[in-house]
Amino acid sequence: MVDRERLLLHILLAAALHECGHMAAVYAAGGEIASFRITLFGGELCIRNAARLSYGQELLAVLAGPGSNLACALFLAHMATSLGWERAYVIAGIHASLAVFNLLPLRSLDGGRALFLALSYLTQPITADRAVHVVSCLCLGLLLVAGAGLQGMLGIQLPLLLCLIWAVGNWCLETGIVKPAETR
């Protein structure tokens, strides 16, 4: 009833491929996964002995998730074109959307982490952290303005609204405006 187009399985598979891309790159760089947690909006990897990975290795591991989705999107688009399989365009769009969303320069997404690592390589980590904070705030502001405009034009779109709430919630947690609930 909610998933009339039957896309939920494809969304979950795209998310799984994304996380597998991260994991494969971490293992290829000689790292170990300490834990993997599924959250409301995706997976969260913790790398054991992350200090062993260079900035470049960690950057590749961060970009491997979106990269695997982009590669899959290109492959599916090619299949759609070659075989006339129109449904593959929709599935390719899911992969491409997930990759592009994760590449946004928000601190809690792959794009924010990649920006931090690249800037840390070029400057000091504290300078990189401050720069990522500013870029993340600007990006969030633009997303809120664009999201409000789309909501006004299209009416309330629940997925977009949930993404905006998630982004604002993460920003509040990261800046310390809201403290996470203590677990017992």
Image (cartoon, rainbow, N blue to C red):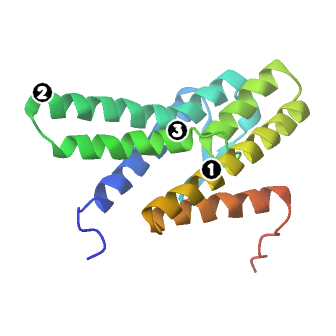
Q: In the structure shown, which secondary structural element does the residue marked by tag 3 occupy?
A: helix
Residue 78 is tagged as none
As drawn, is 182 to the left or to the right of 14? Answer: right
Which one is in front in this view, the residue at disc 1 or the one at disc 2?
Answer: 1
- For mark 1, does the 10 Å Cα neighbourhood hold few (<14), some (14 to 19), or many (20 or more) residues? some
The residue at the point 59 percent across, 59 percent down is: 148
Specify which label sits upstream in the sequence, 1 or 2.
Answer: 2
Q: Which residue reaches farthest left? A: 83
User: Of 132 and 35, which appears nearest the observer?
Assistant: 132
- For mark 2, does the 10 Å Cα neighbourhood hold few (<14), some (14 to 19), or many (20 or more) residues? few
Specify which label sits upstream in the sequence, 3 or 1.
Answer: 3
Quote the CA–CA distance across marks 3 and 2: 29 Å
**Is the C terminus in the top left, top right, bottom left or bottom right quadrant?**
bottom right
Identify residue for label 1: 143
Provide residue 54's location: percent of width, then percent of height: 72, 24
The residue at the point 23 percent across, 68 percent down is: 4
As drawn, is 19 to the left or to the right of 107? Answer: left
Q: Amino acid at mark 2?
A: Ser
Q: Amino acid at mark 3?
A: His
Identify residue for label 2: 82
